Image (cartoon, helix red, strand yellow):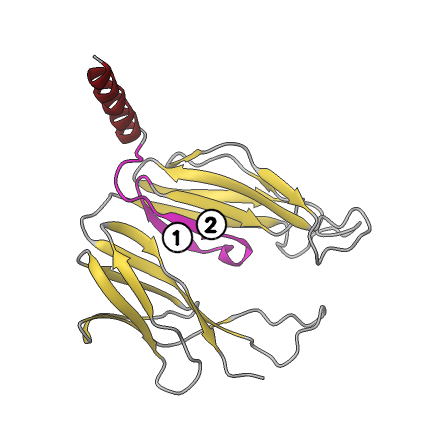
Amino acid sequence: MRIRAVLVATLVVLVLSAADGRSGAAATTHVGDRWNGKTVAVTTGDVVVATLGSTYWAFGPTPSNLTALGPAVARPGGPSCPRFPGSGCGTVTKRFRAVRIGSGALTAARTTCGEALQCTRGAGRWRVTVRVRPASTRAILVGHVTSSPSCPVERADQPCPPRPVAGNVQALRSGRIVASAATDASGRYELSLAPATYDLRVDVHGTFPRCPTRTVAARAGRQVIDFDCESGIR
């Protein structure tokens, strides 16, 4: 009787997980401030985590192709934040699950961009289009290739964010290139592969930036594989 009860409970969990779109290999996609105005593609069952760099941000209504996995969570403060109140320094994060095929917009808004500083020129609006696709038997590898540092010395008034890398992301098996994809202007790439283990490398047609080789067990569905390359700037 005990074994039967365990089997029944396990079956119930599996059925509920499938109904919630959580069966299979779900991936997690992170979007933030630099994604403003861009489009991200995910598959049904995937999780989208939106993190914005100010506690003044408030997320808009959840689009119909996603469901919110709880309320937004604000985390004020941090080691680099000023000690005086009112700066809004910190982050706000909200998690979503892709539940319906189609496109929808994640939005957020704020009216204050710092201590007594009103937002101007669109700095108070954030919008990312989320395109949900059906789950696939192919392995879809996506990500961004960036290099850092982008300047010798970074100062508070002259930040040096990572720069997108122009190159080709190559998937190799047994030392042979089986697929390749060029990065776009933002450093983004996308590869469609049969599920297997691959070595991923970035061909930049030069010595720098120098990008690491990644060994990836590609599974059916979507995976995010980013590359942080060494720019060679000292």
Find residue 143 and report its horizontal and vertical position in percent: 38, 61
What residue appears at the point 80 percent right and 47 percent down from the top-left corner? 85
Q: Residue 128 carries which label?
A: 2
Badge 2 or badge 1: first in the primary sequence: 1
Find residue 146 and report its horizontal and vertical position in percent: 46, 70
Which residue in the rendered view is the most extreme toward the bottom?
Answer: 206
Image: 231 above or below 185 = below
What residue appears at the point 63 percent right and 50 percent down from the top-left corner? 124
What residue appears at the point 62 percent right and 81 percent down from the top-left corner? 152
Instruction: Give the class, few, some or many, for how many residues have Cα within 10 Å of label 1's Cα (few <14, many ≥20).
Output: some
Residue type pointed to by label 1: Val
Q: What stretch is highlighted in magenta?
A: 21-45
Image: 119 above or below 208 = above
Instruction: Give the class, few, some or many, for how many residues have Cα within 10 Å of label 2's Cα (few <14, many ≥20).
Output: many
Gap between marks 2 and 1 measured at Cα: 7 Å
**64 left or right of 81 in image:** left
Residue type pointed to by label 2: Val
Is the Cβ of the residue at disc 2 closer than 8 Å to that at disc 1? yes
**Image quadrant in which you'd find residue 13:** top left
Find residue 155 and report its horizontal and vertical position in percent: 70, 72
**Image quadrant in which you'd find residue 188:** bottom left
Q: Is residue 8 magenta?
A: no
Total tally of numbered discs in the picture: 2
Image: 20 above or below 231 = above
Q: Which mark is residue 40?
A: 1
In the structure shown, which secondary structural element does the residue marked by tag 1 occupy? strand
